[in-house]
Every structure is written in C-alpha cells, then in structure tokens.
C-alpha cells in the first residue's frame, strides 16, 4: 500500500499564489509519474501537471506559464507552485502517483484531494 499526504490548498484572491505538496510513502520501489489533477463542480477530473521519473513534465494548456511542478526525490514529494491564480482554477486538486512497488508491480494511487478556491 501507498499513502499520499496532500497539503497546501486554501482560499486565495485572484492573482495570488498557492503551493501544493504531495508526499508518497509505503511500498514504493520507484515513482514513475506523479502529479495533480483537478475537478471543479459539475466537471470531469482533468490533468493539471505531472512529472515523470525522467523529469518530463506535462501541463494543461490552461496552466502553462502559471503553474510549476517540482520534486524532491529524497522525500518522494512533488510540489505544485500555482501563481497568477484565476477563479477558473477553483477546484478540488487530487494528487496522483504511478509507482513500481517492491514486487515490481505497477500501481496507481490517488490522494484525498485538497480544495483550492480563488475568489474574485
């Protein structure tokens, strides 16, 4: 089993910044991909940003230039720096990780979600 601990959500005004963090622990041999998805009320969950073990990043077009994903491999932690926030960024943000466990099996896990609210 793998546990994901998210933090950093909250309420911020338009143009403000927040930083999300997600720490993974448990039966992890390696992390393949880790990042964030978000889901706004009445909408489907969508990719926000991910980073692979090879440092390849993928961002939603709507956040490019405003959000930056980074990582601390020693802590199995990924960070999402969100700048110039807009009301449309309001959503529950979910951490996602694809790992290889110690038995060399691929597994996927989701965090519990953290609310980000941008007020205008």
Image (cartoon, rainbow, N blue to C red):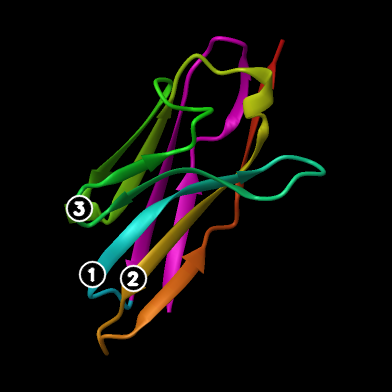
Label 3 vs label 2, nearer the camera: 2
Q: Are marks 2 and 1 in contact (CB under 8 Å)?
A: yes
Q: Dot 3 lies on which element?
A: helix
Residue at image position (72%, 40%) is 40
Q: CA distance from mark 1 to mark 3?
A: 10 Å
Callout 3: few (<14), some (14-19), or many (20+) C-alpha neighbours within 10 Å?
few
Residue 85 is covered by the magenta coloring: no
Q: CA distance from mark 2 to mark 1?
A: 6 Å
Q: Earlier in the sequence, mark 1 or mark 3?
A: 1
Mark 1 highlights which residue? 30
Determine whether, in the image, residue 108 is placed left or right of residue 34. Answer: right
Residue 22 is covered by the magenta coloring: yes
Percent x, y for residue 58? 37, 43
Q: Dot 2 lies on which element?
A: strand
Image label count: 3
Percent x, y for residue 53? 22, 57
Mark 2 highlights which residue? 99
- Name which quarter of the figure residue 2 lies in: bottom left
Furthest residue toward front:
61
Residue at image position (37%, 55%) is 34
Q: CA distance from mark 3 to mark 2?
A: 13 Å
Callout 2: few (<14), some (14-19), or many (20+) C-alpha neighbours within 10 Å?
many
Mark 3 highlights which residue? 73
Callout 1: few (<14), some (14-19), or many (20+) C-alpha neighbours within 10 Å?
some
């Amino acid at each position: 089993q793998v546990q994901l601990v998210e933090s950093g959500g909250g309420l911020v005004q338009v143009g403000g910044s927040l930083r999300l963090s997600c720490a993974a622990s448990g039966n992890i041999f390696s992390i393949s991909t880790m990042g964030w998805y978000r889901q706004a009320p009445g909408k489907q969950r969508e990719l926000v940003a991910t980073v692979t073990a090879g440092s390849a990043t993928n961002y939603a077009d709507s956040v490019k230039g405003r959000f930056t994903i980074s990582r601390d491999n020693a802590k199995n932690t990924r960070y999402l720096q969100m700048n110039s926030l807009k009301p449309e960024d309001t959503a529950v943000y979910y951490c996602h990780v694809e790992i290889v466990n110690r038995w060399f099996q691929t597994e996927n896990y989701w965090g519990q979600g953290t609310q980000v609210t941008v007020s205008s």
